[in-house]
Amino acid sequence: MRFPEPISVQTLAARYQARIIGDSTLMATGINEIHKVQPGDIAFSDVRKYFEKTLKSAATIILLNEETECPPGKVILVVANPFQVYDDIVRSFRPFQPIIAQFAPDNDIHSSVIIEPGVVIAHDVKIGANTHICSNAVIGPHTVIGEHVTVGPGALIGPDAFYFKKMPDGEMIKWRSGGRVILEDHVDIGAGCTISKGVSGDTIIGRGSKLDCQVHIGHGVVVGKNCLFAAQVGIGGKTVIGDQVVLYGQVGVAQAIEIGSGAVVLAKSGVSKSLEGGKTYFGIPADEVREKYRELASLRLLPDLIKKKGTD
């Protein structure tokens, strides 16, 4: 999430009674989870074993709950509860605003957009020319939809991320979702699809990609250009998918992995690890289709081998 204007480290330290270690002249320009941070971003860690990973990331301002050495060009803000501070910063820029009208007044919707009956559009939404929003779709806040996009009936674009912080006592605390959903030009979203906004980054569906009905895209997923996802595909949060990837029906993709451009995953497969592009995959867990078929053929021979061994 980018801030409308940079925030000084001194301002943040005063607001949260933080001890400053490092360059106190730095400015925060955004806030993000560790996997998406950029220079100028705020990130946090409240577990010592992850301090080094956070400090070596691209983030410039680091929220920690213990003092440690600060790398050059960065600053550490030591606070009692880094998660709480992080979440409070997000909430200050993304306060809860319930939908109280069918169309929020602060939207930017091109005059050529077709909006069918029953559509609900939340605040701070931008929709480009010649886009078609079908009946009963819900467009959540801070969504950006390009030109020549079709959003199918009953689709949900931009619900909150399914993301919780597990506390020491086992309680699950919901993170405030500060990200967006971006549908680039010439994207087609089928009926009943759900595309969650990022926790603090963006969920992106690349130009020309097509989603069949009842596809779920998790928080912060980045989908490349001209991809094709068949019905009931589900993609876990923070996964990155290249261009021209095909996922056939009921493929499940784990969170925080990568699928290379040109990959094809056959129906009912389960993708649990990153996949190279330009290959075809099948199975649970998904593997190259030739290897998986050889494996299945070998398994079919196993009963006869066991029976033969028993008669020897």
Image: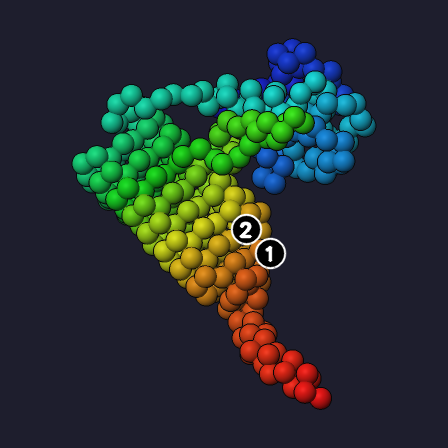
Residue at x-position 57% and y-position 66%: 287
Q: Which residue is outermost to the right? A: 69
Which amino acid does the dot numbered 1 rest on? Answer: Lys
Q: Earlier in the sequence, mark 2 or mark 1?
A: 2
Which amino acid does the dot numbered 2 rest on? Answer: Ala
Q: Position of residue 294 (x, y in %)?
A: 57, 77
Q: Is residue 226 visible?
A: no
Query: Is residue 63 rendered to the left or right of residue 263?
Result: right
Confirm or deny contact between disc 2 and disc 1 (CB under 8 A).
Answer: yes
Q: Which residue is outermost to the front? A: 311
Q: Is residue 87 visible?
A: yes
Q: Please tell me which residue lies in front, 5 or 305.
A: 305
Q: Mark 2 = which residue?
A: 254
Query: Is residue 176 rendered to the left or right of residue 28?
Result: left
Q: Which residue is outermost to the left? A: 117
Question: Badge 1: few (under 14), some or many (20 or more) residues near its Cα, within 10 Å?
Answer: some
Q: Please tell me which residue lies in front, 119 or 227.
A: 119
Q: Please tell me which residue lies in front, 10 or 99.
A: 99
Q: Please tell me which residue lies in front, 81 or 244.
A: 81
Residue at x-position 36% and y-position 53%: 211
Q: Which residue is outermost to the bottom? A: 312
Above or below: residue 198 compared with residue 309 = above
Residue at x-position 68% and y-position 83%: 310
Tell me the number on the disc at residue 273: 1
Residue at x-position 55% and y-position 47%: 255
Q: Position of residue 114 (x, y in %)?
A: 20, 40
Whole-number angstrom distance, CA of label 2 to CA of label 1: 7 Å
